Structure formats: structure tokens, C-alpha cells
Image (cartoon, rainbow, N blue to C red):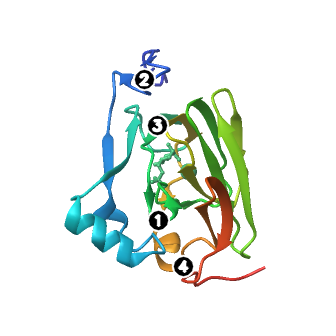
């Protein structure tokens, strides 16, 4: 018996812009897609009314099956900016299979990988071009652009990891990255609903 072989292939990655060729799914996340995730809900509504539906970040992924045995990869570009004093960020997720890990490779700009465990432990890993940041099993992960230019990185994760957005949508992250005197600072999230450590 023989199995059907997948043909080897390659992807071109533009190291500056994060563009992938060929590309599979492209997702754009706008402020309205995340309106409950920023602490300053008044700032969210003000931006939506006065400026419109701001593009916060874009994700490009290579077209591969989301099943065990495959390694998925894609790029994320988070545009610079703040909502109130909170920096632009991704929604963030746990993996549905909690023990699946992930790696991020910084390509441009600067920011943080923010990780949270289910007991409320939060860690922040600063990232810049050349940083390889590791998401160990069982940590939720979100990235935040704390700079003035697009924060671009490549992510690589197991095909069967799955994205659990629901838990973060319900509970939030225990700590937020906000700008204080021009510097990124972690503060407690008044709307956090999960365990605290
Ligand atoms: C990275 C990876 C992707 C993820 C993306 C945006 O590229 O972790 O799996 O989709 O960041 O993050 P999120 O899905 O949480 O918005
Ligand atoms: Zn992930």
C-alpha cells in the first residue's frame, strides 16, 4: 500500500512587509472586530465615530491542512497606534489543544509577545527584528505593537493546535500594555474576569 505524497513546495516571504507568495487565507482585523477587547470603551466608540473602522492588524497564512502532522505558518502585521493609552494588539488566543506550542520570529518593528496562563500568570517577552520568541504549551498569546512603525513577525505552529478565541473574549488578559510617558508599561486590567495570581 502506498500513501499519496504531497509535493514539496516553497513560499516567498518578503522580510520587510511580511507578504507571502503564494498566500492562503488573509484576515484583516479592524477595531470593530475587537471593540470589547480594549479597556477604554469610550475611546473605542470615539474612534469609530470620528475616524471610522481602523485597521489594527492583518494575518496571512500559507494554505495547509489544519490537522496533525502539518506545520502551519503565517505572518502578522500590527499597525502602530493606540486605543486610549492601550497599544494596538491582536485578539489573542489559547490553542484548543492546550499543549501545542508556537514560535514567533520578529521581522520588523518592535513589540511584545504577551502570554497568560489559566491561573492568571502573565509574562511579556519584548520582540524586535531577529527575536525568536517561544510560546510554551498551555499559554494564551497575544502580540502588541509598542513602536511607531508596523510590527511584523512570522509565526509557526502545529497543524492540529486550533484557535480558542472564546476564553480570551470572555475573560480578557489580566494585564494590559499601555503607554506611560512614552514607554510601554503593564497595568492591571479592570475588566479581567479570570483567575488572578
Ligand atoms: C500569529 C499566529 C496566528 C494568529 C495571529 C494573530 O500569526 O499565532 O495563529 O492567528 O498571530 O493572532 P490572533 O489569531 O490571536 O488574532
Ligand atoms: Zn497560537
Query: How packed is label 4: few (under 14 Cα within 10 Å), some, or many (20 or more)?
Result: some
**Image label count:** 4
**Residue in the picture at 68% in, 61% down:** 185
Q: Who comes first in sequence, dot 1 or dot 3?
A: 3
Note whether 169 is above or below 126 in the view shown.
below
Q: Is mark 4 on a helix, strand or loop?
A: helix
Cα–Cα span, label 1 and label 2: 34 Å
Q: Position of residue 165 (x, y in %)?
A: 47, 65
Q: Name the residue under label 4.
A: 171
Cα–Cα span, label 2 and label 3: 41 Å
Query: How packed is label 1: few (under 14 Cα within 10 Å), some, or many (20 or more)?
Result: some
- The mark lying in front, picked from 1 and 2, is 1
Cα–Cα span, label 4 and label 1: 10 Å
Q: Name the residue under label 2.
A: 4
Q: Who comes first in sequence, dot 1 or dot 2?
A: 2
Q: Does the residue labelled 4 lie within 8 Å of ligand 1?
A: no
Q: What element carries label 1?
A: loop
**Residue in the picture at 39% in, 25% down:** 19
Q: Is mark 2 on a helix, strand or loop?
A: loop
**Image mark for residue 165:** 1
Residue 184 in view: yes
Query: How packed is label 3: few (under 14 Cα within 10 Å), some, or many (20 or more)?
Result: many
Q: Is mark 1 within 8 Å of ligand 1?
A: yes
- The mark lying in front, picked from 1 and 3, is 3
Q: Who comes first in sequence, dot 2 or dot 3?
A: 2
Q: Name the residue under label 3.
A: 150
Note whether 169 is above or below 190 in the view shown.
above
Mark 3 and mark 2 in contact (Cβ < 8 Å)? no
Q: What element carries label 3?
A: loop
Mark 3 and mark 1 in contact (Cβ < 8 Å)? no
Mark 4 and mark 3 in contact (Cβ < 8 Å)? no
Q: Nearer the viewer, residue 126 or 9?
A: 126
Amino acid at each position: 500500500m502506498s500513501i499519496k505524497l504531497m509535493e514539496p513546495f516553497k513560499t516567498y516571504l518578503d522580510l520587510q512587509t511580511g507578504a507571502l507568495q503564494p498566500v492562503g487565507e488573509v484576515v484583516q482585523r479592524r477595531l470593530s472586530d475587537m471593540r470589547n477587547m480594549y479597556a477604554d470603551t469610550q475611546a473605542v466608540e470615539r474612534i469609530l465615530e470620528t475616524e471610522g473602522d481602523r485597521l489594527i492588524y492583518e494575518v496571512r497564512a500559507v494554505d495547509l491542512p489544519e490537522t496533525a502532522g502539518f506545520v502551519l505558518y503565517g505572518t502578522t502585521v500590527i499597525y502602530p497606534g493606540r486605543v486610549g493609552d492601550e497599544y494596538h494588539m491582536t485578539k489573542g488566543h489559547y490553542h484548543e489543544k492546550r499543549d501545542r506550542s508556537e514560535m514567533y520570529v520578529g521581522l520588523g518593528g518592535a513589540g511584545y509577545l504577551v502570554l497568560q496562563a489559566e491561573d492568571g500568570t502573565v509574562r511579556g517577552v519584548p520582540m524586535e527584528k531577529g527575536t525568536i520568541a517561544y510560546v510554551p504549551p498551555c499559554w494564551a498569546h497575544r502580540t502588541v505593537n509598542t513602536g511607531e512603525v508596523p510590527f511584523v513577525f512570522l509565526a509557526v505552529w502545529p497543524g492540529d493546535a486550533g484557535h480558542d478565541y472564546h476564553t480570551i473574549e470572555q475573560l480578557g488578559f489580566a494585564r494590559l500594555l499601555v503607554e506611560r510617558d512614552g514607554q510601554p508599561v503593564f497595568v492591571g486590567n479592570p475588566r479581567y474576569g479570570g483567575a488572578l495570581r
